[in-house]
Amino acid sequence: MAEITAALVKDLREKSGAGMMDCKKALTENGGDVEASMDWLRTKGLAKAAKKADRAAAEGLVAGKIAADGKTGVLVEFNAETDFVAKNDGFQNAAREFADVALATDGDVEAIRAAKTSKGEVVQDAITNLIATIGENMQLRRSAKLSVSQGAVSLYLHNALGEGVARMGVLVAMEGGGDVAKLQDVGRKIAMHVAATAPLALSTDELDPEVVAKEREIQTQTAMESGKPREIAEKMVEGRIRKWQEEVVLLKQPFVMNPDQTIEQLVAETAKETGAPAALKAFVRFALGEGVEKAPEGDFAAEVASMTGKA
């Protein structure tokens, strides 16, 4: 009988898509013969994952969780092929479980996949077994974690499909030594704003230089096409770039619940109300299936406005 080595288990796992323990059992049952083990896994319905792996998974859920102390929050995106599966209790429970695991790790998606659930099952193995049970390709696509030393991290889930799961999730980290409940409330309102406006960066300093350069060139070419010499066009562009930044930088954006006030001004007002310094440190926005073929998103700005009577 061939020795069941880690390399042999890894080989079978890659070929079959089945869980590590299932692969080890299959090899043990079949004397280390990989082909026979593949057949064994197929008869048990555990090799379905491999056949699904090349199918697009743009549906599913975004799961979010805030730690008990309110200072850390996580988002995970768990994808499947159809929105029907997103309504499955087993799928939703798995997404919530993976968010719990994310809180216990550094938030990196690879670390989550390698970690164990509360039931002692490796997350990637749990996904593989769920694929075999439900019959669709699935993947834990991405994750994020925000923390503050003092203050609060707030979570907003848009288009919720169940407790802690939705089609979009936003985390906002508010740092400050004042009233934590106030910081949580303002953070959640800003998270709703982020869901509506999809800012590119927190501040102008954090904008991707390549994105800025591309926008500058577009605005320059637009000005030149109107007949202006390049040197004149470039001067005109500075004003246009500032206006563009107001549209895409979170701190510069008009607050959707009060357009007369920018997010930066809202944070400053919050600091005055709490009697302590307050700062918006970071945000994360996960819209289900971003970067993967998907249906268009709804008009979140209109929805947020309707929630607050500002429509």
Image (cartoon, helix red, strand yellow):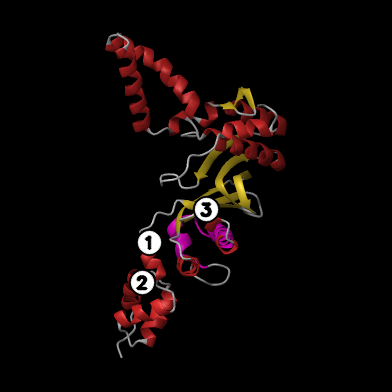
- In-front residue for pair 86/202: 86
Secondary structure of the residue carrying tag 1 is loop
Q: Which residues are magenta?
A: 92-116
How far is disc 2 from disc 3 in space, using C-alphas?
25 Å
Where does residue 149 sit, x and y in percent of width and height?
A: 59, 46
* Secondary structure, magenta segment, majority class: helix
How packed mark 2 is, by other alpha carbons closer than 10 Å (few <14, some 14-19, many 20 or more), is many
State yes or no: residue 166 in magenta. Answer: no
Residue tagged 1: 53
Q: Residue at x 50, y 69 (%)?
A: 133
Q: Mark 1 or mark 3: which comes first in sequence?
A: 1
Location of residue 244 with respect to 67 vertically, above or below:
above
The three-letter code of the residue at mark 3 reads Asp
The three-letter code of the residue at mark 1 reads Ala
Residue tagged 3: 83
State yes or no: residue 95 in magenta. Answer: yes
Tell me the quadrant of the picture where the N terminus can be found: bottom left
Q: Residue at x 60, y 40 (%)?
A: 175
- In-front residue for pair 166/66: 166
